[in-house]
Amino acid sequence: MSRFYAQAIEATVSAIMQPKPLPTSGTPVVAIIGGGVSGAGVAYHLARAVDDAHAAIVVFEPRAELGRGLAYDTDDPAHRINVPAAKMSLQPDDQGEFQTWIDARDAVACDPEARRSDGQIFPRRRLFGDYVASLLKPLMDDGSVRHCRAAVTHVERHAGRWSIRDDKGGLTEADIVAIATSHPPPVAPGRLTTLLAAHPRFVADTTKPGALDVIRPHDRVLVIGNGLTAADVIASLAERGHDGPVTAISRRGLRSRGHAPVPQPLYGDFVADAAHSAVSLLAGIRAAIDAAKAQGISWHGVIDQVRAQGFDLWQALPMAERRRVVRHLRAYWDVHRFRIAPQVEAVLDAAITAGRLEILAASVADARIEGERIPCTLQPRHRRPPLERSYDAVVVTTGPAHGGILETQPWLSALAASGHLSLDPTGLGLACTERSEAIGPSGAADPSLLISGPLARGTFGELMGLPQVTEHAFFVASEIASKLRLAASNAHPA
């Protein structure tokens, strides 16, 4: 567990950091909106932390099982976790639990490609969802956690509590709400959606089930984006037998990197003399990579150390510099930090070698529909003239549209309109304090409304990788448990 989370959890019991009392009526109710890894993690750790407090924990999640979310609810055999199983866990202090779970069940016996020659395991993503669901099942069986299989439609503050309505007609009253929804889906750049919406093979959202079914084996495909989702799409198409040419474009033409051939030690210290600007942070990382290389350590060890110290580094940067990092360096960080599984990397390498995959630093300047064809004008980043290309399918795999999170669901926009939520100034999600308490437009934090997972990234700096998501879920659960205990002690003073 990172130093920040260990210290923050310890601090929840100190007098200085004690949370404000929360009104409760009988048994306190905690509602968690979103049942992916983040929401399931909060429910799991909270149930274990307050088993003597008799709190009711309800998770709103339309999917059949808790713990899957978008990432781990896929049946696509090409979709693999991009971190070795030995580093995947719902337990911040036991990174190897998932691998132990796999070994105990021989869970990759039917997936021979999962186990690499060095012993590392990169299983299909659905298997991690199976693991998380298995941890939640006993808690649901004994009533510690209740899964409300419904989508939230409205949330409002009323008489000191939260009223939550869902699409099944239910009404739940809660004392504490944790927002653990996923990041918003990608948005096609420019006017692309308007120009191509009528085409049967314009795929604007690859997260929808069967989204790639419309692409035929020999289609010429334009993939807009070059990150993990783009890699998944290209690997999925190859798994389906697609052999047509693929062009993958992004502003900088950066392809997601792979893992080191062997595990690398952490290298560097970025906290002792923390950078206070994006430029100095970048210079420090580059210098560390050069120094590591001289000692036979790859850049992977440096980037992993930056990730490990990420919270402290982020806090040292003024807001203006955080915005510069997001605007200018985020793309470089993402392709080095969020690495693709070796199996996916092999598919991309083979496609490039065969001349079927072209990666360009370019944008779509224009596009139109001509029958079944999609003629596109691509504007290269560093040269002219534009490239005129014709495709049979266009797939959007740009990153999450964080700036549009409040518009993705009506209940979120309603909470913002009523003064309970606001966008984080970095543009990475929802504003919250270092206690993960939501901050409204007035700048005031609400101790009964918390943000868990990637939507808190603007405050915590790194909440997209699984280890950080699980650490943050544990942290949020600890915060809630502390609030419940304080409320109970105030209601029944010694």
Image (cartoon, rainbow, N blue to C red):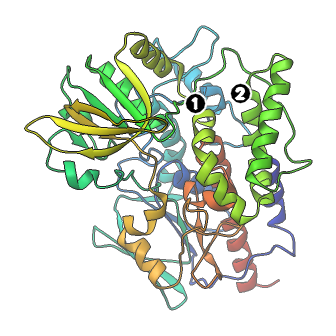
- Where residue 233 is drawn, which disc sits there? none
339 relative position to 415: left or right: right
Question: Pointer 2: what residue?
Answer: 300
- Vertical order, 256 against 48 (above or below): above
Q: Say which residue appears at 83% left-offset and 30% top-offset.
A: 267
Name which of mark 1 and mark 2 comes first in the sequence: 2
Q: Position of residue 45 (x, y in %)?
A: 64, 53
Answer whether labels 1 and 2 touch (C-beta < 8 Å).
yes
- Vertical order, 242 against 165 (above or below): above
Q: Which of the 4 image quadrants contains residue 246? A: top left
- Is residue 29 visible in the rendered image? The answer is yes
Query: How crowded is the residue under tag 2: few (<14 C-alpha within 10 Å), some, or many (20+)?
Result: many
- Vertical order, 82 against 132 (above or below): above
- Is residue 77 visible in the rendered image? The answer is no
Type of residue at label 1?
Answer: Arg
Q: Say which residue appears at 58% left-offset and 28% top-offset.
A: 101
Query: How crowded is the residue under tag 1: few (<14 C-alpha within 10 Å), some, or many (20+)?
Result: many
Q: Say which residue appears at 60% left-offset and 60% top-offset.
A: 456
Question: Pointer 1: what residue?
Answer: 339
183 relative position to 209: left or right: right
Task: Tell me the SS state at disc 1.
Answer: loop
308 relative position to 439: left or right: right
Q: Position of residue 190 (x, y in %)?
A: 34, 54
